[in-house]
Image: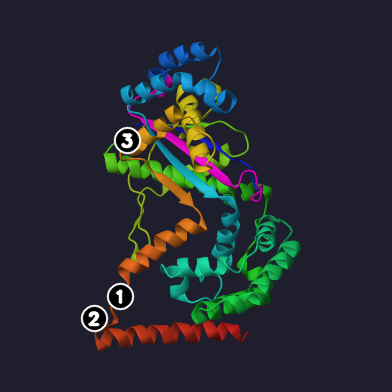
């Protein structure tokens, strides 16, 4: 299987550009090398449009409609599949804040179950409701500030603001955990290792890398579900993030013997048979596969953003949905809330089904963990 990856909505480390709040990654896959198999058809389409390359944003609805029927047929002939991965960038700032300050391995005032089980997700959503845009901005500024003193000052400000907003929270347990975790960070800001140490490290926590991580894990899942192997993974060349993309791909590649079961309802991590091929960074004007990704990504982005799109073009993405294999992965607080709300609705334990011994063990664990974490609040 051949994969071609392109992105849109790139604003680097600026998460709060109102005109581009979402980062998009589009992935096209085919059992054929599209740089060879699709090139003759694309050459014809370019001639029809009188262009050197097909750039969807430059051509727009009016021009792309002219080639829509041939693009549909090409997708059928070459068994082209399209998948979409998105990151809602303002939410990324709050998710990063949670991951760093509520990590029970670093913040001893946090409960074990509140971080290492699915209970972390409703807590994250409740925490996010205490944030406004200014707080999210300051949390992100602190995260990417390489000056430790400046970063810690901003971090303390955010934690204090979170505590000040706790009055609006009705969930007593969430309120207690958030208050305790934030107070511990305020007293021990350097212990959290909140900010990055260099500009190079900042690329590894950018929404681009979170989106690309979703891409490569999606590729791995597709290969597993179809019992196929990756022949090539072609990524659009752009100087800023290619090295970081290669880094995250190589990281997972080295973990290809990892198989961690989803303990207590947490997601499973199975990296066995992770793609052995490297990421190949190729200029977009030198790859027919990347040329096709650009078109599909532009169409899907306009659909999601509720912008005008010709029905003939919308049909290209509907065809993908009708195949029943379209993956759409979204990193956002809304998606997290929806997914895990459904999980808890379907998996709420029936207390009456527990034996007295099981209830006693659970209570003992809770009391032991509470004593542990509360002991750190006194320091």
Q: CA distance from mark 3 to mark 1?
A: 40 Å
Span of residues in magenta: 14-35
Q: Residues within 10 Å of mark 3 (few under 14, many from 20)?
A: some
Whether the residues at callouts 1 and 2 have beta carbons within 8 Å, the answer is yes
Of the pair 20 and 116, the residue shown nearer to us = 20
- Helix, strand or loop status at disc 3: loop
Magenta stretch: residue 21 in it? yes
Residue 377 is situated, as x and y percent measured from the top left of the image, at 59, 83
Whether the residues at callouts 2 and 3 have beta carbons within 8 Å, the answer is no
Asked where in the image residue 32 lies, by quadrant, the reply is top left
Residue in view at x 56 percent, y 26 percent: 60
**Residue highlighted by disc 1:** 349
Look at the image and tell me whether residue 18 can be seen.
yes
**Residue highlighted by disc 3:** 229
- Left or right of 141: which side holds 104? left
Residue in view at x 52 percent, y 14 percent: 49
Residue 363 is situated, as x and y percent measured from the top left of the image, at 37, 86
Asked where in the image residue 1 lies, by quadrant, the reply is top left
Q: Is residue 73 above or below residue 111?
A: above
Q: CA distance from mark 1 to mark 2?
A: 8 Å
Q: CA distance from mark 2 to mark 3?
A: 45 Å
**Residue highlighted by disc 2:** 353
Residue 249 is situated, as x and y percent measured from the top left of the image, at 47, 43
């Amino acid at each position: 299987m051949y994969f071609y990856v392109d992105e849109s909505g790139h604003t680097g480390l600026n998460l709060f550009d109102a005109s581009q709040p979402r980062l998009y990654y589009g992935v096209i896959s085919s059992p054929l090398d599209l740089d060879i198999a699709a090139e003759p058809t694309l050459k014809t389409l370019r001639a029809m449009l009188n262009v050197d390359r097909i750039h969807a944003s430059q051509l727009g609805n009016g021009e792309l409609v002219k080639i829509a029927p041939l693009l549909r047929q090409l997708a059928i002939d070459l068994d082209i599949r399209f998948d979409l991965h998105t990151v809602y960038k303002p939410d990324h700032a709050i998710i990063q804040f949670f991951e760093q300050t509520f990590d029970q391995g670093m913040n001893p005032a946090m409960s074990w179950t509140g971080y290492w089980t699915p209970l972390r997700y409703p807590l994250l959503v409740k925490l996010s409701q205490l944030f406004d845009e200014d707080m999210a901005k300051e949390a992100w500024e602190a995260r990417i500030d390489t000056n430790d003193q400046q970063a810690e000052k901003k971090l303390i400000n955010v934690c204090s603001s979170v505590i000040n907003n706790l009055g609006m929270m009705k969930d007593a347990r969430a309120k207690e955990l958030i208050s305790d975790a934030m107070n511990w960070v305020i007293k021990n800001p350097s212990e959290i290792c909140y900010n990055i140490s260099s500009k190079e490290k900042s690329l590894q926590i950018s929404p681009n890398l979170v989106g690309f991580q979703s891409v490569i894990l999606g590729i791995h899942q597709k290969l597993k579900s179809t019992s196929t192997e990756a022949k090539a993974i072609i990524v659009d060349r752009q100087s800023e993030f290619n090295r970081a993309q290669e880094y995250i791909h190589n990281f997972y590649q080295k973990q290809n013997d990892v198989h961690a079961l989803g303990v207590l309802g947490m997601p499973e991590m199975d990296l066995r048979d992770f793609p052995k091929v490297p990421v190949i960074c190729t200029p977009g004007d030198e790859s027919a596969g990347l040329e096709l990704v650009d078109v599909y990504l532009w169409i899907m982005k306009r659909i999601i953003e509720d912008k005008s799109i010709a029905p003939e073009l919308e049909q290209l993405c509907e065809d993908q949905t009708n195949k029943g294999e379209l993956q759409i992965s979204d990193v956002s607080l809304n998606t997290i809330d929806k997914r895990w709300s459904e999980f808890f609705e379907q998996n709420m334990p029936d207390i009456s089904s527990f034996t007295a011994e099981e209830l006693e063990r659970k209570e003992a664990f809770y009391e032991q963990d509470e004593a542990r974490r509360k002991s750190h609040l006194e320091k």
